[in-house]
Image: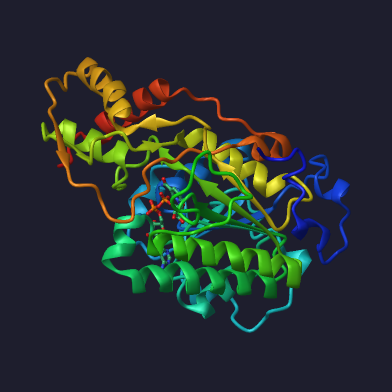
Amino acid sequence: MKSNNKHNTQSLTLSPDNSSLSSVLSPQHSHKPTCWLVTGGCGFIGTNLIARLLKNDPGTNIRVLDNLSVGTREDLATVCGFTESDISSLSPESSVHSPQSLVLSTSEDASSVQLFVGDIRDKETCLKCCKNTDVVVHLAASTGVPASIENPEYDMTANVIGTFNMLDAARRHRVKRFIFASSGAPIGECDPPIHEEIAPHPVSPYGASKLAGEAYCSAFFLTFGLETIALRFSNVYGPGSGRKNSVVARFIRRAMVSEKLEIYGDGKQTRDFIFIDDLIHAICLAATVGGIGGQIFQIATNTETTVRGLVDKLLPILADSCYEGIEVLHKNPRRGDVFRNFSDISKAREVLGWKPECRLEDGLNSTVRWFITHSKGKSA
Ligand SMILES: NC(=O)c1ccc[n+]([C@@H]2O[C@H](COP(=O)([O-])OP(=O)(O)OC[C@H]3O[C@@H](n4cnc5c(N)ncnc54)[C@H](O)[C@@H]3O)[C@@H](O)[C@H]2O)c1
C-alpha cells in the first residue's frame, strides 16, 4: 500500500531555491508562459498542443523545432498558419537571457507560430532555438519500443543526447520551465498500477532512453534550478495520429483497407489508453501550475483495457461507418512489450488538479471519424 505522503519526494526538499514543501505543492502560484518552444511540434501530440495553445490564446508565440522525419509542414498547417525561418536567423552568440525580448512579435498580422527545421541532436540548433523562450515542451524523440529495438543507437542519440542538448540549452538561456515527454516504458515489467514511486527497470531501449531523460530532468532541476517536469504519457490516441503506428491508429488504418487486425499474443495484454485532448490539458497544466519543478507525473486514465477489449469496442464503431466484417489475427508477442500496463494518476489529480474526461468509446468514435475524414484522397 502506498503512503499518503508519497507525493512529497525527497527531491522536493532539495530544491535549489529552498522551496518549502508547502510552496512546492501549492498550485495557486501559477505563471503564464509568453513564448513556447515545442520540439517535435509537427507530430501527433505537438500539433494537438499547438492547436490548443492557439485556441486558448490566438496570439501566443510558439516556436516549433522539428526535423520533419515524421511530422510534416502540411501536418502543422492543418492546425495553424506559420512562418518558416532558418535557424541561422536566430542569433548564435548570446547565452545571456534578455527578459525584455521574451515576446517575439507584437505585430498583429504576423503569424505567432514559427517553424525551425532542425535536429535536437545538434546542440547549436537547440541553443539557438531556446533563446528568449520561457517554456519548452520537449516532444521530439525516437518514439516507441519497436523502433528502439530496431535501432537502439538512434533511439539513444535522439532521446538521450537530444534531450540533454535541449536541457542544457534551456538552462543556459534560463528557460522558466521544461516539460519532458516521458512514458510508462522506464518502469518496465511490474505489478500495475504504475506510479511515480516505483523503481524503474526498463525492458526496452526506449524505456532506458526515456529513463535517462527523466534522470537528466531531475539533475537539471536539483543542480541548476531549471523547472523540469517529466510527464509519463500512457498510450495516447486521437485525431491527428495518422502517422502513428500505435495500436489504435494501426487498427483503424488496417480496418479501413479491409486488412486483418493483428494482435500480438493472446490479446490479454493490457494498456491504459488516454485521449489526446485529456493529455494536452495535462501538458498545459504542467506548464503553468507553480512549484512542481523536478517532479514526475503519470498521465493516464487509471483504466486497464485489454487489447482484445479494445478491438471489441472498436469493431462496432468501425461497422457503424461501413467498415464491417473485419477479421482479427493473432501473432507472436513482441519483444520488449510489457504484459500489463495501467497507471495510478492520483498524484496528477492532487498536484496538477487534472483528471481525464473522455470515455474510451467516445474517444475512439472521434478518432475513427478523423481517420475517415483525413483518408479521403489518400492511400492508407
Ligand atoms: N503517442 C504516444 O502514445 C506516446 C506515449 C508516451 C510517450 N510519448 C512521447 O511523446 C512525444 C511525442 O510523441 P508523438 O506521438 O507526438 O510522436 P510523433 O512521432 O508523432 O512526433 C514526434 C515529432 O518529433 C520529430 N522528431 C523526431 N526526431 C527528431 C529529432 N531528432 N530532431 C527534431 N525533431 C525530431 C518528428 O519529425 C515528429 O514530428 C515523444 O517524445 C514520445 O516518446 C508518446
Q: Is residue 274 above or below residue 172?
A: above
From the top left corner, tell me how far across and down residue 366 is, in percent.
Answer: 37, 25
- What colouring does the structure picture have? rainbow
Ligand 1 quadrant in view: bottom left
Q: In front: 216, or 239? A: 216
* Quadrant placement of the N terminus: top right
Q: Residue furthest front?
A: 1
Query: Residue 92: which quarter of the image?
Result: bottom right
Q: In front here: 32 or 313?
A: 313
| Residue 26 appears in view | yes
Residue drawn 39% across and 47% down?
A: 77
User: What residue is drawn where x is 45% and y is 53%?
Assistant: 188
Quadrant location, the C terminus = top left
How many labels were placed on the picture?
A: 0
Residue 131 locus on image (x, y percent): 64, 70
Q: Which residue is painted at 52% across and 54% down in the image?
A: 181
Q: Can I make out residue 118 in this image? A: no
Q: Quadrant of residue 268?
A: top left
Which of the pair 171/189 is nearer the observer? 189
Residue 241 locus on image (x, y percent): 35, 42
Q: Is residue 117 left or right of residue 51?
A: left
In the shown orientation, is residue 7 left or right of residue 264? right
* Residue ID at (42%, 71%): 156
Q: As displayed, is residue 71 above or below residue 168?
A: above
